[in-house]
Image (cartoon, rainbow, N blue to C red):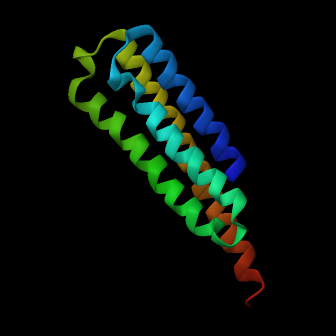
Amino acid sequence: MPKTTLIFAILLVALGAGAFGVSSSRTALLPAYVGLVLGLLAALALAFEGARKHLMHVAAMAALLGALAPAAALAIRAAKMSPLALGVNLGMLLLCATLVALMVRSFIAARSAGSIGLG
């Protein structure tokens, strides 16, 4: 899962950097900030295998917050957003929500595999 998280982190950084390049607005960098946090957590999870489980749970929380922030923004003011802001928010929501879903599926699979050995 850390490698998958790194891929999503790179996509989020690219989304934020691209939006910033087009608009020069600092708020366009929000996906990049979430991507940097996810990338750091994924890199640490790859480096420290003993802490991988905990780091990936923190990454899941960061991804969940990364999905909730644009969802709230879209719910509050989607009609007033510029096309670029709408696209960035939808992109961040899609990327972060997909990552959360993949992480939850991975956590469930890991839990099921671990519980088989306990029985």
- From the top left corner, tell me how far across and down residue 70 is, in percent: 35, 33
- From the top left corner, tell me how far across and down residue 73 is, in percent: 28, 31
Residue 59 drawn above or below residue 98: below
- From the top left corner, tell me how far across and down residue 51 is, in percent: 63, 70
Q: How many marks?
A: 0
Q: Residue furthest bottom?
A: 119
Q: Nearer the viewer, residue 93 or 33?
A: 33
Would residue 108 be found to the left or right of residue 46 on screen? left
Residue at the image position 44 percent from the left and 49 percent from the top = 64
Residue at the image position 54 percent from the left and 62 percent from the top = 57
Residue 27 drawn above or below residue 39: above
- From the top left corner, tell me how far across and down residue 10 is, in percent: 62, 33
Residue at the image position 52 percent from the left and 40 percent from the top = 36
Q: Nearer the viewer, residue 110 or 2?
A: 2
Residue at the image position 69 percent from the left and 65 percent from the top = 48
Tell me the quarter of the image containing the C terminus.
bottom right
Would residue 12 be found to the left or right of residue 1 on screen? left
Residue 22, quarter of the rendered image: top left
Q: Residue furthest right?
A: 117
Residue 72 drawn above or below residue 77: below
Residue 14 drawn above or below residue 39: above
